[in-house]
Amino acid sequence: MGVPLAAGSLVAAFNRPDEWYFQLKKPSWTPPAPVIGFAWSLLYPLMGAAAWLVWRNGGFEEQRSALTIFGVQLGFNLLWQVAFFGLRNPALAFLDISILVLLVGICVWAFGKSSAAAANAMKVYLLWVIFAAALNYKICALNP
């Protein structure tokens, strides 16, 4: 469960919101930065728990496809932080998060074949990623 949280925390430590982010035009429905950070601090362990539920149903050998999809989506999740905050490129970050939405949707489906609880946990994450994608899109539109 700790792998997603540790990976997310490590990447976030080097790609934090700074003056550039705070000066961007953002929609009125943008949550405060601490709320976003808190949400991720809950979602990363939730993702890890979901992966564990799938893994315990046969290990990596039986769950190779589902867990590989999970790993790939986690990679895209972490790359978003680099693209948005590290490279200061909301458009590249939007491309990344658009792919991430698809990957998380596939992950929900793959996890659902092994564990309904894991799929439901990933659905919570999927809803947040869709919200984050909408926010990312709006930031792109407001800051051409």
Image: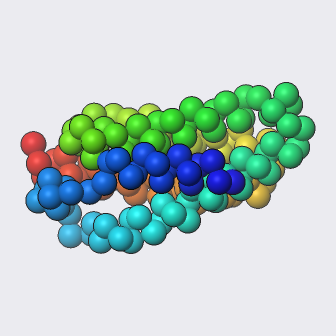
- The outermost residue toward the right is 58
Q: Is residue 16 above or below residue 57?
A: below
Quarter that holds the C terminus: top left
Identified at 14% across, 53% down, the residue is 20
Task: Residue 53: give x, y in percent of width and height.
Answer: 79, 51
Q: In this view, does 10 lie to the left or right of 141?
A: right
In this view, the residue in front, 95 or 52, is 52
Q: How many labels does the image show?
A: 0
Residue 107 at least partly seen: yes
Residue 132, relative to residue 83: is it above or below?
below
Task: Assign the N terminus to one quadrant of the image.
Answer: bottom right
The answer to which quarter of the image holds residue 132 is bottom left
Q: Give the x, y percent position of residue 31.
A: 32, 70
Q: Which residue is drawn at 55% across and 65% down?
A: 42
Colour mapping used in the image: rainbow
Query: Left or right: 125 with respect to 61?
Result: left
Position of 94 relative to 21 (above/below): above
Give the residue drawn at x 32%, y 48%. 15
Residue 84 rendering spot, x and y as whole percentages: 28, 44
Residue plotted at (63% across, 48% down) = 3
**In the shown orientation, is residue 144 left or right of residue 102?**
left
Res 97 visible: no
Residue 136, given in percent of the width and then of the height, sits at: 29, 50
Residue 59 lies left or right of residue 81; in this view the side is right
Query: Which quadrant holds residue 66?
Result: top right
Foreground pick, 77 / 112 = 77
